[in-house]
Structure formats: C-alpha cells, structure tokens
Image (cartoon, helix red, strand yellow):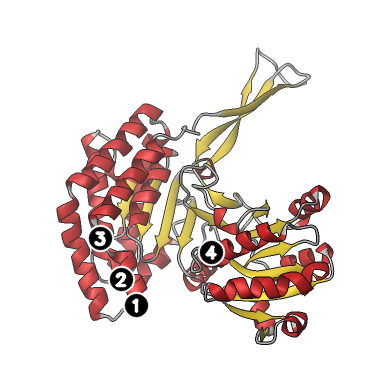
C-alpha cells in the first residue's frame, strides 16, 4: 500500500467497495460451505506456523526496540500454543449454529398475510483494534460465519503478524473459489487510513473498535458509520443485607483478583450498612491477602484503620489493577443509584438470598449484564455460551452486552400472502 495520503485514501475506498461486492457472495453462502472454510483456515494457520512466526518475530523485535511494556510484548508473541488456540477458535465457531436465515416468529394478520422476521448478515464490518494478533483470526471467524465481509485494521505494533494471518486466511477463500475481498487487512499503519475507513459509510455497515478508551473515543468521534462502543468497565458488586457472607467473599475475591486487568473485573464494592461492621473488616483482610489496595468511604475507614480514603474520582475509576473502591450504602436503592450514576453499563452483581431484591436489582440496574450471586468475571461471550464474542457493547443499539454470531446479523421482515391486495 502506498504511503502518500491521497493514494492511501483511494486504496482504502477501493478496499471498502471490494468488501461490499464480496459481502453479497458471503451473505448467500450456505452453512456447510462456511464451516468448511473455517476448518480449512484453522488447518492453514497450523500448517503455516513457521512463516507466521517469522513475521511475528519482526513485530516482537521492533516492540522491544521501541521499549514497549512487557505486558504488551507478551500479548504480541505468537507461540505454538497461541497459534493452536487461534485454530481451535476457528473450529469452535465452525461448530456453532448458523444464525443466518433463521425465522424468528410468524404471525397471521386479519388480511390473511403472514408476517415474520428473518436473520440476515449486516454486510461489511470494520474492526479497528490494538495489540493482539489473534483478534485477526477470531474476528474473521465470527464475521464470515455470520455471512459478512470484514475489514481489519490492527495496530502498528502487530502489522506484520496481522498481515501474515490475513494472507493465510484469504488464501483459503480463494482456494474455495470465494472472493478474497471478503477478508481484508489494511496494510498501512498511517492514521489517515483509519480516517478514510470511518468515512466509507456507503460500503461499511458497522465499525467495532477493540482497545483502550482513547482508541474507542477517537473512532466514535470521527466515524460516519455506526460504532459499537465500550469505553471502559467500571463493574460493581453489591453485597446485600441478606447475603451469605462466605459466598460474598468468594465472589468478591474472584471478581477482583482472578484477572484484575480486564474489563469485567470488579472495580467498586458496595456493602449494605447492616452487615458493614462484620463484612468490611473481613473483606478488607481477604483482599489484602491477595495484594489488593482498598480505597474506602468514611464508614469503611472508621471500621478498618488503614484503608485509604476514597476520592470522588475513585467511584468512576477503572483501575485494571489490584485496587478496589469500597462504599457502605444505606440500602439497595442507594446501591442502585450509585451504580446507575457511576457505572459504565458493563456488568453489575448483587449477592443476596432475597429473591425480591435479586429481581428488583436485575430489573432496575441499567447495565448490559446484571448478575445474581455470581462473579462478574463470567461476563464473557464464551462463558455465556455464545461460543466466542466480537466484543462487548455498552451501547443499546443494536446490541447490548457480549456480542456473538447473532449480534453480527440483523432481522428483515418477510411476508407471505395468497393474493391479498390492500383495500
């Protein structure tokens, strides 16, 4: 791909038009052919692992030269195990039910016509992502299985790896006589490529950014195309007065410490005042044993001497670290009010033995996932039985929460008549 801005703009527009044309073929591809394609792609990744790792080594060496963090370099490296995991991911998506063509209900009208709704692909999906090269294969699998074409633009730190994965997968499209343009990896790291991509509203139907809050805000603010947004995960756990405290402790420890650097980790713990005197010291001790720093409200600070005082900013913080904000609330109403004021519409948990409180919490909390007596770490497409996820949406149109195959489709109306005309 050329490096001049005008040439890049033209090439991105041509790429988008080619994807639009290819999407027509993919939308009409049968389930058996799509499954065969994904199986062949999985095998090709494993058979070409040496060439793939050679390209990956270029990215890793550059990342070290650029002094990227150890965590980011680790995410870049394509070990044999990770390549096998990518291949397994493709095979798992192949095994999932195909949503395309599903008719979701039919009803008869007084005129005699029958009306229903059928699932169809969205068309062309643009994925803009950072760091992890496995996203190239994961996103391709989900988009192709749901009958869409896909355009992938990864970060500069993984350009050689992403391009190599894309070339391996595209070859299998061609080997099956399918348009390679159904899967395209943008071959430049120039920022103007993203800007152009976000303005191709005639050819791209949806943009899904995956990465940090800065990337997602940039995409949202500059796109003419609908964007699936997920700025951050400020997830709460509320321990009710009727909670089993042993269970509450297990859930809270898992939600905070099992993997603190992910979006479904708990960031704020809310505790009912009736159990605060018992539970605050207990959970403080449990958290400290796992290396967690606590930042608490005045009540928490009065119950445990060495808890740091929380500031207003702590209630909105996504720490992605072993830090936890803790607040004592008067009742569930106050807990729900706090969540709806400070949450990010991601995942919220209530721990309680009260059915009525559980029902009220799940109904009144506005987030995309509400859970009862379970760790927020389960808020994941794979854990929900979706097989895999393209991302988590914290916007309500057109999907809300973890997004699987169904969420990469829309529904059209279908009508059957027997000659009716409208009076």
Q: Is residue 301 above or below residue 327?
A: below
Circles 2 and 1: CB distance less than 8 Å?
yes
Q: CA distance from mark 2 to mark 3?
A: 13 Å
Q: Secondary structure at mark 4?
A: loop
Q: Is residue 219 above or below residue 244?
A: below
- Residue located at (37% from left, 47% from top): 140
Residue 298 in percent (x, y) is at 76, 84
| Numbered badge on residue 340 | none
Asked if residue 190 can be seen in this view, the reply is no
Q: Earlier in the sequence, mark 3 or mark 4?
A: 3
| Numbered badge on residue 73 | 2
Q: CA distance from mark 2 to mark 1?
A: 6 Å
Q: Secondary structure at mark 1?
A: loop
| Residue on which disc 4 sits | 263
Circles 1 and 3: CB distance less than 8 Å?
no
Residue 71 in percent (x, y) is at 36, 72
Q: Earlier in the sequence, mark 2 or mark 4?
A: 2
Crowd around label 1: few <14 · some 14–19 · many ≥20 (10 Å): few
Q: Nearer the viewer, residue 327 or 135?
A: 327
Asked if residue 406 can be seen in this view, the reply is yes
Q: Nearer the viewer, residue 249 or 364?
A: 249
In this picture, residue 364 sits left or right of residue 24: right
| Numbered badge on residue 69 | 1
Q: Secondary structure at mark 2?
A: helix
- Residue located at (64% from left, 55% from top): 368
- Residue located at (27% from left, 53% from top): 81
| Residue on which disc 3 sits | 161
Q: CA distance from mark 1 to mark 3?
A: 18 Å
């Amino acid at each position: 791909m050329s490096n001049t801005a005008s040439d890049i703009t033209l090439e991105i527009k041509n790429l988008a038009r080619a994807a639009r044309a290819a999407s027509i073929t993919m939308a009409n591809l049968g389930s058996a052919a799509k499954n065969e394609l994904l199986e062949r792609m999985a095998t090709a990744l494993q058979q070409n692992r040496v060439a793939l790792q050679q390209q990956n080594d270029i990215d890793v060496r550059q990342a070290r030269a650029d002094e990227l963090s150890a965590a980011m370099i680790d995410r870049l490296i394509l070990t044999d195990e990770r390549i096998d995991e990518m291949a397994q991911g493709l095979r798992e998506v192949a095994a999932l039910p195909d949503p395309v063509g599903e008719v979701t209900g039919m009803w008869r009208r007084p005129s005699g016509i029958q009306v229903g709704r059928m699932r169809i692909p969205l068309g062309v999906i643009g994925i803009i992502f950072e760091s992890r090269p496995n996203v190239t294969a994961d996103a391709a699998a989900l988009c192709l299985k749901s009958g869409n074409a896909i355009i992938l633009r990864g970060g500069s730190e993984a350009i050689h790896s992403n391009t190599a994965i894309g070339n391996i997968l595209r070859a299998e499209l061609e080997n099956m006589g399918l348009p390679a343009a159904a899967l395209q990896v943008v071959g430049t790291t120039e920022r103007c490529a993203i800007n152009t991509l976000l303005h191709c509203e005639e050819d791209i139907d949806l943009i899904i950014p995956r990465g940090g809050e800065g990337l997602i805000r940039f995409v949202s603010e500059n796109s003419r195309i609908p964007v699936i947004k997920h700025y951050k995960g400020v997830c709460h756990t509320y321990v009710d007065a009727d909670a089993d405290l042993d269970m509450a402790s297990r859930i809270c420890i898992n939600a905070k410490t099992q993997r603190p650097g992910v979006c479904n980790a708990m960031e704020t713990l809310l505790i009912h005042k009736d159990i605060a005197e018992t539970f605050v010291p207990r959970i403080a001790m449990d958290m400290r044993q796992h290396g967690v720093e606590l930042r608490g409200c005045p009540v928490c600070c009065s119950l445990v001497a060495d808890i740091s005082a929380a500031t207003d900013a702590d209630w909105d913080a996504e720490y992605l670290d072993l830090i936890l904000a803790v607040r004592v609330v008067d009742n569930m109403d106050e807990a729900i009010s706090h969540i709806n004021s400070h949450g990010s519409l991601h995942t919220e948990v209530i721990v309680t033995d009260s059915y009525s409180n559980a029902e009220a919490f799940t109904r009144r909390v506005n987030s995309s996932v509400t859970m009862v007596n379970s760790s927020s770490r389960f808020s994941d497409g794979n854990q929900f039985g979706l097989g895999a996820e393209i991302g988590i949406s914290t916007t309500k149109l057109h999907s809300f929460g973890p997004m699987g195959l169904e969420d990469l489709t829309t529904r059209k109306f279908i009508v059957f008549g027997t000659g009716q005309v409208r009076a």
